[in-house]
Image (tube, coloured by chain):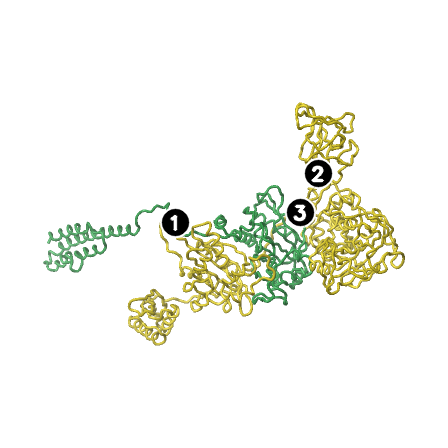
Amino acid sequence: MDEALKSIIQEAETKTRELTQRAQFEAVKAEFVGPNGSFTALRKEIGKLPKEQRPEYGKKINGVKESLESILSATLTRIEERELEAKIGPAIDPTLPSPDIQMGSEHPLTQVLNRIVDIFSKVGFTVAAGTEVESEYFCFDALNTPADHPARDMQDTYYINEEASFQNIKQKADERYVLRPHTSSVQIRTMLKEKPPLKILSPGRVFRRDTADATHSANFHQIEGLLVDKNLKVTDLKAILDYFARELLGKDAKVRFRPHFFPYTEPSFEVDFPAAHLGKVGKKWIEIMGCGMVDPTVFEAVGIDPNEYTGYAFGMGIERIAMIVYGVDDIRYFYQNDQRFLEQFSR
Amino acid sequence: MLVSLDWLKTYLPDLDKTPEELDEALTLIGFEVEDIHETGLPPLQNVVVGEVLEKAQHPNADRLSLCQVDVGTSENASIVCGATNYKVGDRVPVALPGAELPGGFVIKKTELRGVPSAGMMCSAKELGLGDDHAGLLILEDRPEIGTPINDLYSNNDTIIDVEITPNRPDCFSHIGIARELAAYFGLKLKYPDINTGGNSFSEDSGKSLLKGVTIEAPETCLYYSGYSIEGVKIAPSPSWLRQRIEAIGLRPINNVVDITNFVLHEYGQPLHAFDAGKIKGQEIIIRNATEEETITTLDEKERKLQTSDTLIADAERGLVVAGVMGSIDAEVDDNTTDIVLEAAWFTPKKIRKTSRQLGLSTDSSYRFERGVDPVAIDTAAYRTIDLILEIAGGTLHERAWKAGSNAVETTEIEITPDFIRERCGFGPEDEAIKESLTALEIEVNEGDSWKATIPSYRGDLTRPVDLVEEFLRIYGTDKIPEADVESRAFNRNHTREWTVRNAYSQYMRNKGYAEVYNYSLILDEETRLAPESDELALLALKNPISSDQTHLRPSMIPGLLNVLKRNQQHHSQTSAFYEWGRCYRKKGNELVECVAMGWIIQETEAKQWLNREPTDFFKLKAMVIDILRLAGVKYSENLVKTDSLPSFAQEGQFAVMGDIAKSGTQAEFGLLNLKQLKEMDIEGLVYAVNICITPDVLERKEKPIKYTPYTLFPPSYKDLALVADKKESASKIREALAKAGKAVSNKEMQVDAVELFDVYEGTGLEENQKSLAFNITFRGTSGTLKDEVVNKAFEEMQSIVEKKSPYRVRR
């Protein structure tokens, strides 16, 4: 019996030495410890022994059992390691290029727009939306620009065919539909729908009937801001735009106000950025946007009491800012969508 | 508007600013300077008139001459010269040593080819007088020898091109601009001295070249005055007047016409001079044009008039399109001796309408459209009469015809300095505020509140808030102090559209797509690429500007295809683009504006060291479901259609989910038509998506999420295959099985999920059949399910499906 026990260990060592597959291992394991295994048979022998021999035999059996277990578990570990290795495969060359498509890019105009929205969001402005097709009333009349106003000259507007009407764009009466020439119509509709105080941004696409060239495009983008509250002052307007300039261009940047005329604001200003901050030389200031205090007539048109509330509004062209910030010299690049252009703005 | 600085200075004798300072000043008071340039001869020292006394060959150079030139000093100048266009006795400009010519060229005593030369005889170009450098400038008028050259060419000037905003018609004149500068710099304004005055005339008697003036169109003509001057001599204008006219880019015509043009640009009041002899019946009638009436204007074009257009007519015919342009019939010409001068006031709206109708914008119509100063009408007329009498001679008749009225009520605005300070958020003492306003000739009467009397030419000032801007302009916008941004919370969210847009953009970017911006306007043919294209004639613009941008886009795909095509020429790598924007669809008889999201992908079969699975329909579908989820819309298989596809779809490889007209959402996605792509020269497989959502769908409130407890008991699974017609949609088949699952569910046991895991066609099935295999999850609600329970439910499900649907269980 001792012999048999000894030979089991030897046999186990021999048989497991070359094992590489889990199935083979299980078979070999069964040969020893399975129901019909040789070790199982030897263990059963203990019952046949006289009582006094049993403890000694038991000790021996246990010793063999431990050895057997350690042989088997070592074998299993070895097999598992090999399996794992097989799964992992050979070492890779990490410098090989990935064939997968990589992160895409956001259009430079989106990036500039987001940056501007972020800057104003920090001080409490939120985005309001409107449609790109609008009716004349919301683009002109409500903005203190009646039909015979010379200022309508300044905006040559696209009109929609008279047969077309838009189910989700409400007219004031039966005035014509236009492609909005600015996003101020969003301000009008928001003021009609929501009660002051209001603090909104209206970014979006606008349309002018211009012949396309390096600085003109049939459609372009604007963002306008509107704050309606009590006791707003010109200094508040200047402060918010100085803040904007600092955020966009750097700590010591500020804006210059030039008196101007817009029908919907009084007083009105054009706003310049310091050219030096934009890396431009030769000029001290670069015109960047228009702004002003909301004209009382506009408030009256939307049913806000101009004696109770004041407001300011500002608006700028996204393309213009993008062109200045990125040094793009032709607006048409933004609409040609050449990959060689777009991928330069991938971050 | 072009402004001559020299001219301006006649009203601002104390103005001593450089062009740069004027540029800045005008800019800061609201007049953008578009251009500023010098004209005429710049001031030159040591350049005088000289006469060539001798001309000899240079001893050492064939092409040079050696001249003795009398320059008005005791000694003649000996000058070497290379020009050939002059002869002895000619008078020419001579730059003597010490002179600095334009471009910084300094004249010194020098030696040329071994011969001393004490100066230079000059060409026009060398003096800065134009481009002529073919030879010396020969002074044909033979001015006095030694005269400084600037005395001959004294018309140097600075021309400023100023942009005038539409609210400031008063500044379409030199006096208007001068007034602004006077206010800003605190200078005294010197108005022209005028001899003629109201008391020079009688309105009801006395001599006149006219027998009457009648306004028959009072809605157009508010005021009309006619003056008579007899015996003028039409001639070219004197040089000072020619210089003024030329400085602002006009062509001098004759003294009378030039004078009216001069006064127009001085006061901003358009005037008209008639040849009195050409006024038939000696009367002037201001009337509307008759049906089909035509007039040949001074630009020699025959103009067809409408009955809303107004004419200044005589007894027989129209002489002037009121406020716009005269006709050739009453033109002042070289033979004119008697003149009728018109100074009138027309309704801006009417002049604007006529000007538009005729497509004719003139200096006159431009000013009448925007509004002239009613008070200055008489002043300008008197100024014109003064100048005609002075320059063209003649006798002024006593009778002035006047019809209508130019009397206007004076605007008074009640305002307090506190109001101005409050609106500005800053401000100086009362006195300084008052000064800013009075500088603009606004009369301020102090009291509890101020009464500000507005000059007649400032029709734009009617309300207190208008004076806030006036104060700021003159006080200086550069004095607005810096302030902190005050920001209180308004508890308003970004519109969902904005949030969805950003989520969409990030999603697409992370999937490797590049964002593009296409125009919203597209070609007619491109609209046909959308579904229901035959109904999209409504998308046409009324007034397109170019033939490739005539229609609103119904889909993002045409634009995206163009991007693909354009880039195909440059790149061989995978092209994947996305766009966000708006597109337009039909809903009933109307259109709806939709938020649109579109993307396109074309994978090239370029060699790769490691192969990847290419894009297919189902990758696209997963993206569509994701994007709709971001937009708060649930993708529903029940709403999927595979018929009535857009024309660019490849049949059998494309689907439309939803209906914009019904649910406000529609997604079109799949493979694009290969034939069409080939026609566009696009090779290979192109997948594209267009999603339209009406904005109201995006703004819908999100359903609140509510937690339902889940059971911890382990589920049981069963597999089942259903055989169906090949054309039957998987979603329908699954739906039938799920329904059966619902039917067998009860309090104790639920069918949790029915998931498709295999599609099979072929051996064992008939040709027109397919088999779909599903995995069904059963779950107990109060304990682990016993096999018998599951088996029973499973059996029941099978019999329900077979009873209630055309599908057969594959056993």
Residue under numbered circle 3: B34
- Closer-to-camera residue (A94/B531): B531
Few, some or many residues within 10 Å of mark 1 (<14, 14–19, 20+) = few
The location of residue B198, given as percent across then percent down, is 86, 54
The location of residue B686, given as percent across then percent down, is 43, 57
Dot 3 lies on which element? strand
- Closer-to-camera residue (B75/B808): B75
In the orientation shown, which residue stands out farthest toward the right?
B206
Q: CA distance from mark 2 to mark 3?
A: 24 Å
The tint of chain B in the picture is: yellow
- Check residue B129 in the rendering and tell me which mark sits there, or answer none: 2
Few, some or many residues within 10 Å of mark 2 (<14, 14–19, 20+) = some
Q: Earlier in the sequence, mark 2 or mark 3?
A: 3
Dot 2 lies on which element? loop
* Vertical position of residue B156 compared to residue B713: above or below: above
- Which corner quadrant of the image does residue A127 belong to? bottom right
How many marks can you see? 3
Tell which chain the image draws in green.
A
- Which corner quadrant of the image does residue B219 belong to? bottom right
- Closer-to-camera residue (B7/B14): B7
Identify the residue at horizontal 52%, vertical 55% (top origin). Answer: B517
Q: Amino acid at mark 2?
A: Leu
Q: Is residue A295 visible?
A: yes
**Lateral position of residue A252 relative to residue B561, left or right:** right
Which circle, 2 or 3, is nearer the viewer?
2
Residue under numbered circle 1: A98
